[in-house]
Structure formats: structure tokens, C-alpha cells
Amino acid sequence: MAKINKPEKNPETKSVSIIYEETMRELVICQEQAAAFLRDKGMRDIEQTKITLFLQSTKLANSLILPRIEFQKIEWQPYKFFNHQIYKNIQSSYLLAKATNWTRDWNVYAQYSRVAASFWDQADIGKYIVSNFETDETGVKLYEFLAFSHALLSEIRITPIVVDLPPDNYIGLLSEIEEENGRQIQLQVRLLKNMAVPLTLDEKEDISLTARIKLGEVYRRFLVFLCEQ
């Protein structure tokens, strides 16, 4: 039976790009171990419940921009993009809830509360909520949230760990959601490149990589939880 090993962290100070590369290597290993676990155990109601709870958390986090786009000045094209993204997040959450074979083991839900708390802390969700109500004349805070949103969609991918499982409605829905995520990622990349913000290219890269490091660690911790017995 596959078991995810928690990699040890090097305490030495490193550049953001090096930390990102190490985080991604660790994440790939964890994904491979999770895929092996699911091949061994199958996609039972417990695994479906864990995955759905986690994905719904990511969709909620990705909708935290709502106050900023509704109550602060934002250009029309980004506004339409965020509005569409919020709608698709809500739709995905409802479809996941319908397609999931929910477990009756309430201990799973209690255990997930720890994962949710870790998600909130590790991804620094509170910062994005607070920033919605702060002035942002430079657009830097919006840029930071867009980088965070991009990391949510690009780093947290479930299809690689279920690729070897027999297809069904739930597996099919996961693929459909990630196909939509791919379209949103392309639009996000365009917005990130075209946003006029007072940041250097290095500063932009550091913001993007830092967000991806945070979300990579969030996803790794979830994979550990997914494979717990």
C-alpha cells in the first residue's frame, strides 16, 4: 500500500526560484504516491468526499476577489473575466456536491477541518480577504490575488492522481473542471502580463513563485490527508 512520505525541509536560506523547484519536485513525488494509493484502494466514498471537500475549498478561495471587483474600480475586461470565473467556481462546487458519493463516516469531516485550517494559514487567505477592503490605486494587490488565483488553478490538479482509475461520472467531472481551469489559466496569464503595475519583472516573478510555493505545499498536505487510513 502506497504511503506518502513528508519530505524534510532544508533550513538554509534559498532563492524563491530554487525553493519553487524543490517544492514542485516534492509535489510530483507526492502525486505519484497518491496515484499509487488510489490504484491500490480505488476511489471509494471516503476518497471522493476528501477530494470534493478540498476542491470546494479551492473554489471558495478563488472567489474571495468578489468584493474588490464589485466595489472598487476595475477595467471592464478583467471584470468580465473575474465575473465568469466566480460563476464557474459556484457551478463546479454544485456539480461536485451532486456527483460525490459522500461518506457517512463523520470522522472524515472532522479530520478535514484540520486540512481546511492548514489551507487557510498556509495560503494566507486572510491577507486576500483584508486586501479586498483596502485601496489599491496601483493595482498591486489585485496583481497579487491574480497570481494567487493562477497558482490555485495551475498547481492543484487532481487528474494526475486519478488517471489510472476506471472512468465514471465523478472522474469525468474532475476532468471537465480541470479543462475549464486550463481556459481560465490562459486568460490569467494574459492579464498578468498586461497589467500595468509598478513592479519589476523580478518582483512579478517572486510574487508568482511565492504563491505557487504556498499552494504547492497546501496541495502536498492534502495528498498526505487523502492517503491517511
Image (cartoon, rainbow, N blue to C red):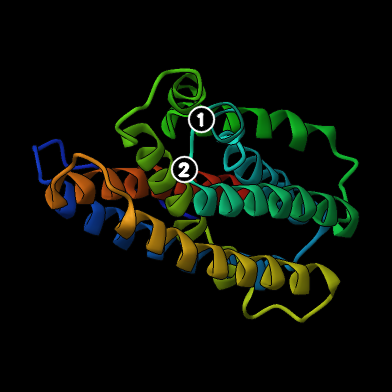
Earlier in the chain: of badge 1 and badge 2, it is 1
Residue 222 is situated, as x and y percent measured from the top left of the image, at: 55, 46
- The image quarter containing residue 214 is top left
- Within 10 angstroms of label 1, few (less than 14), some, or many (20 or more) residues? some
- Within 10 angstroms of label 2, few (less than 14), some, or many (20 or more) residues? many
Q: Which amino acid is tagged 1?
A: Ser
Mark drawn on residue 147: none
Drawn side of residue 190 relative to residue 225, left or right? left
Q: Which residue is mark 2?
A: 218
Residue 212 is situated, as x and y percent measured from the top left of the image, at: 36, 50
Q: Which amino acid is tagged 2?
A: Val
- Distance, label 1 to label 2, CA atoms, is 7 Å
Residue 142 is situated, as x and y percent measured from the top left of the image, at: 41, 37
Whether tag 1 and tag 2 are in contact, CB under 8 A, the answer is yes
Name the foreground residue: 53 vs 128.
128
**In the image, what residue occupies the spot 55% across and 72% down?**
160
| Secondary element type, mark 2 | helix
**In the image, what residue occupies the spot 57% across and 54% down?**
81
Tell me: residue 107, above or below residue 188. above
Name the foreground residue: 211 vs 19.
211
Q: Is residue 1 visible?
A: no
Tell me: residue 127, above or below residue 163. above
Drawn side of residue 124 relative to residue 50, left or right? left
Residue 21 is situated, as x and y percent measured from the top left of the image, at: 23, 59
**In the image, what residue occupies the spot 87% across and 60% down?**
99
Drawn side of residue 98 relative to residue 126, left or right? right
Q: Which residue is mark 1?
A: 118
- The image quarter containing residue 28 is bottom left
**In the image, what residue occupies the spot 50% across and 50% down?**
78
